[in-house]
Amino acid sequence: MLLLATSGSVNWRTGGISDPIDVTAPRDPVWTLDHDGGSVLITTTIEAPRLEYDFKVRELGWDVIGVPWFDTNAPLRMACDIANVTPDELLSDVDEFGTNVRDALVSARLVLSEPERDELRELGALVGEALGAGIDAWQPGVSTDFDVAGVISGALEAQGAKAVCLIVGGDDRLRSFRHPLAIGEVLHDAIMAVVVARRAGLHVAATRVCVRRADDEIVTLMKALEPINDAVLSASTPGGTWGGALDALAVGYRDAGEPDAWREHYQGGPIGFEQREFELAPTQYDSPFWNLSRSANTAVAWNPSLRGGAKIEETYLVGDRLELLSATPQWPLVDGPHGSRRSALKVLS
């Protein structure tokens, strides 16, 4: 008996039908139950009619059960009643009840189906376009980081996607902080825009950096970052382990003369039904994902960075070649290993 309660798991199991009302909530408004008698969607009496109308879920083989929104224990109690089990007998993706099998679920869903890959391609194109629109809207000395963030968010929302992570900042704050969140500051010389967007339960991540002058120090830092990014991409094709990719990343930082820089920021990893399905550090050998084999048709988004304003982040589909999903139209592209390409730093003059 498998009861799933988190958004990543629910969207994987249902094909992306759930859109959390509260993006900060630890539990999805829809839970799925697979038991000996069939498959059930358990949600509130508020959401059940919408699911049936919008997605025709009964035609897809789901029973739909509504429970009171004001009874926090109702979904679990209903699941146990339907399956005729106690909470301890369930498999789940949370720690609060049953046996948590989330790690096994994540491992199983890393390989994306063809419809999932197609959706990710569409979302990737949208993310690239939205980031380009935001940067193009920047007027140095006039536009604020709020202005740019608004353009990016609007472009995503217009196509049914949401920015679950949106970071826009520039100038001295970009050079000082890894996450220069927008504060309404006018940007004069440099800008970074970071997006993780979600649609149909899937995620795409990308970053764009733009400076006004070719002699900006960020230009030098981005060049120093390129071999680090290439190192981890070279170790991302099928056949090795995810731990091996992290080892390659660490070697890339070491060879660039920055052996400890990976400790200063998240490094990314496989992406799909979560912003990152898991993130590893080069020292986490005991992680259940360290020795997990890399497979074809997995999506990955690394984001190596260097202090001072340099970061590279794109989303790829992994195969014998790395298929770039998040390209920005009219932006220069840089070639990388295994057929990968990425958007280059943009210099205005």
Image (cartoon, rainbow, N blue to C red):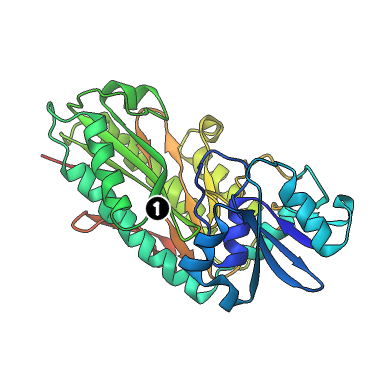
Compared across the picture, whether 64 is left or right of 259 comes to: right
Q: Nearer the viewer, residue 202 or 309?
A: 202
Q: Measured from the top left, where is residue 249 in percent x and y?
A: 54, 46
Asked if one can make out residue 312 in the rendered structure from this viewpoint, the answer is: no
Q: Position of residue 275 (x, y in %)?
A: 51, 48
Residue 227, horizontal then vertical, whole percent: 42, 48
One can see residue 35 in this view? yes
Residue 137 occupies quadrant: top left
How far from the left and from the top, in percent, is residue 98? 83, 50
Q: Secondary structure at mark 1?
A: loop
Q: In the rendered image, which residue does mark 1 sit on?
A: 314
Left or right of 254, for residue 1 = right
Using the image, determine if residue 94 lies above or below residue 18: above
Residue in the foreground of this view, choosing between 172 and 119: 119
Q: Is residue 179 left or right of residue 170?
A: right
* Residue appearing at x 65%, y 40% in the figure: 70
